[in-house]
Image (cartoon, rainbow, N blue to C red):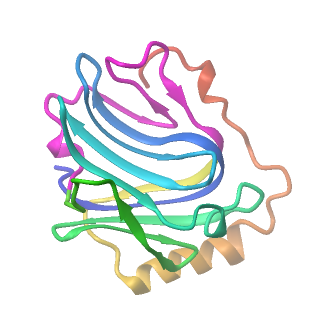
Amino acid sequence: SLDGGAISFWIKPSAGPILSISNTKNYNFCKISVDTTKVIKYEAHNFDEVLVDLKTKGGSKALKSSDWSHVVINILDSGISIRINDKDIPILRAPNTENARVFAIDIDQADYFAIGRHEDNMTTNGEFFNGQLDEFHIFERELTSAEITYLYNVGKKSCLPPLTKPSRCNFSKFKGRW
């Protein structure tokens, strides 16, 4: 079951949802997104209760839309941590919330899982990611600092420089659940 672990990916973002797990019939969801200021947000709602509402501090200083960045989000019993390009990033909490372990298992009656799209009963046509994602992985356990460094160095040295024309996926063209 997905009650914790790690999410790792390379991103060249503009804005929008990166990962979404939700119940499309109500307002239950866990969503990772990036906003136009390049802040990564981690949100989880269960009906009217906000379970988690976190965002990275620093925005475009850590994540740039013109460069590929490696992101790892560890979901631990002690809360959520985020590393961008092998550096720990400070996390800000919304007022009256805490940094708690929340993931897929915590979303009551989840019936939707998507990369690059978010849908719940409040969205009419869904929200879509604008940018590029690559090497998206979900792990059933926390990644160690050494493993994160390894993934960053492998991607930086052997995967990204040869890319001259990365493949693009326009998520807005997908109409159904996939």
- Indicate the position of residue 105 as horizontal and vertical percent values: 16, 44
The correct choice, above or below, for 36 with respect to 78 in the image is above
- Indicate the position of residue 36 as horizontal and vertical percent values: 63, 45
- Indicate the position of residue 69 as horizontal and vertical percent values: 63, 65
**139 sits left or right of 147 in the view:** left
Query: Who is closer to the viewer here, 13 or 1?
Result: 13
Residue at (33% x, 54% y) in the render: 94
Membership of 47 in magenta stretch: no
**151 sits left or right of 169 in the view:** left
Question: Looking at the image, which residue sits at the far bottom?
Answer: 146
- All told, the count of numbered labels is 0
**41 sits left or right of 134 in the view:** left
Residue at (28% x, 71% y) in the render: 142
**144 sits left or right of 65 in the view:** left
Question: Looking at the image, which residue sits at the far front?
Answer: 95
Quadrant location of the C terminus? top left
Membership of 124 in magenta stretch: yes
- Indicate the position of residue 100 as horizontal and vertical percent values: 20, 60
Query: Who is closer to the viewer here, 60 or 24?
Result: 60
Question: Looking at the image, which residue sits at the far right?
Answer: 164
The correct choice, above or below, for 23 with respect to 36 in the image is above
Residue at (25% x, 26% y) in the render: 27
The correct choice, above or below, for 177 with respect to 157 in the image is above
Q: Which residues are magenta?
A: 102-131
